[in-house]
Image (spheres, rainbow, N blue to C red):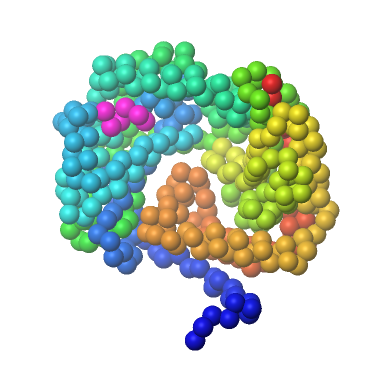
Amino acid sequence: MGLDRKRIPEVFPLPEPHLPGWDSYTLGNGVKMTVLRTDCEAEVFRITTVSGGGRAEARTAGLAGLYSTMLQEGSSKHSAAEIAETLESNGAWLQNSVSSHHFVSQLYGLNVSAAEVAGVLAEMISSPVFDEDILQIRRESAAQNAAVGLRKVSVRANNEIAGTVWGKGHHNAQINTPEAIRGVTGTELRDFHKRIFTPAGVSVYLAGHITDELERIVTDSFGSIAGNGKEPCIITPVPPTASCGDIVRRVCHDESKQAAIRVEIPTIGREHPDYEMLRIAVTALGGYFGSRLMTNLREERGLTYGISAGLSGSIDGATVSIETECRAEAADEAVEQIRREIENLATTALESEEMHRLRGYAMSRQSSTLDSPFTIIDVAKNIETLHTPEDYFERTNRAIAAATPEKIMEMAAKYVRLERAATVIAAP
């Protein structure tokens, strides 16, 4: 039967997604294991390790970033070259990152070579050596990258808005200048590792094609990390030290012909019962292509190629964040229209078609969490690294089902308020 192109195909609503469970237990040395056992045809796995201690605990700019980089540059048993060779020859891929309060390593590998690579990861995070020659190379590379970044108008705007919202002394407002990075020493890195690392402060998240043999390999590798009797690093939220009150700041950036605009509004955190509904409201404002900011500034006025709004929740607090870039001469008009849409969200209800699109997008994004074992296990990881509630997925489902135009306006009126906003315009 041929396809009738004159007939609009039927569209069915997505069913409510359901999150599979995972198993958690603690090894003899204190390492916490979380294992997701799902059907995964491809014989691949991912090991994610989370260790307490990040930018906040490092205290000085540049230290946490270099620590994260240097973790894979040699351990007590293997040189940097040997680690690289082991991973590459076995088809494994490693990525390290640092956040406000945690270091995260993610190792993707093939089940057939798990025994060769899992132990390497355990060694890397537990016994890095911070080789001085390699540190000199990595430090200079990071310093030069930082110098390039500081010439970008977007980075200038990001740095200014962070200092405005969080306070100049807050770890979220640290600026990794070339000078700060070049000042980090191997002794500082080794002392930092001694201060924050303990097996009892390590969490391992395992997902993929999970077999008894794979799980045994991983638990043996991380269970063999020698205990040191130390308590895990205490993760303490650090709220903003600044106070926003509809601040507008302009910073000159002569090296760009573009303007970068950042608007941030401190708001409720992930533990608040309104958080999930507020996320939907912020999505309506600027979280997808059909949002109000995109419709106004891109589609109707041509002020920018793209603009986004998101709700960013961390251990330290949450902000509604709006960002865009545009022609320098269009910056004032862009800011005016952003403010207009913020106010309209609280006073002008979404029309039925707009609400239909929003709900469909929110449910699609929620369902994408179930795309793979790796995205599912990230939900478990976020409970630790972002302090999301354990029932966050179910709470989001309920918020999507309960969302109405009236609820959207209520959230905007209560939590997306210009009198608490900070605006930065970086332009030539």
> In screen coordinates, is 3 left or right of 378?
right
The answer to whether residue 356 of the structure is visible from this angle is: yes
Considering the image in quadrants, where does the C terminus appear?
top right
What is the number of callouts on the image?
0
* Residue at 51 percent of width and 47 percent of height: 387
* Residue at 22 percent of width and 34 percent of height: 84
Q: Which of 410 and 69 is in front in this view?
A: 69
> In screen coordinates, is 217 left or right of 277?
left
* Residue at 18 percent of width and 36 percent of height: 85
Please state the horizontal and vertical placement of residue 79, each as a whole percent of the image: 18, 28
Please state the horizontal and vertical placement of residue 216, each as a whole percent of the image: 19, 54
Q: Nearer the viewer, residue 277 or 340?
A: 340
Q: Give the range drawn in magenta.
A: 68-73
Name of the residue lying farthest toward the right: 347
Q: Which of 260 and 7 is in front in this view?
A: 7
Please state the horizontal and vertical placement of residue 402, each as a whole percent of the image: 67, 66
Give the quarter of the image for residue 4.
bottom right
> In screen coordinates, is 50 left or right of 349?
left
Give the quarter of the image for residue 335.
top right
* Magenta stretch contains residue 36: no
Please state the horizontal and vertical placement of residue 190, each as a whole percent of the image: 31, 21
* Residue at 38 percent of width and 21 percent of height: 141
Above or below, 350 relative to 331: below
Q: Nearer the viewer, residue 422 or 109?
A: 109
Above or below, 369 relative to 16: above
The answer to whether residue 126 of the structure is visible from this angle is: no
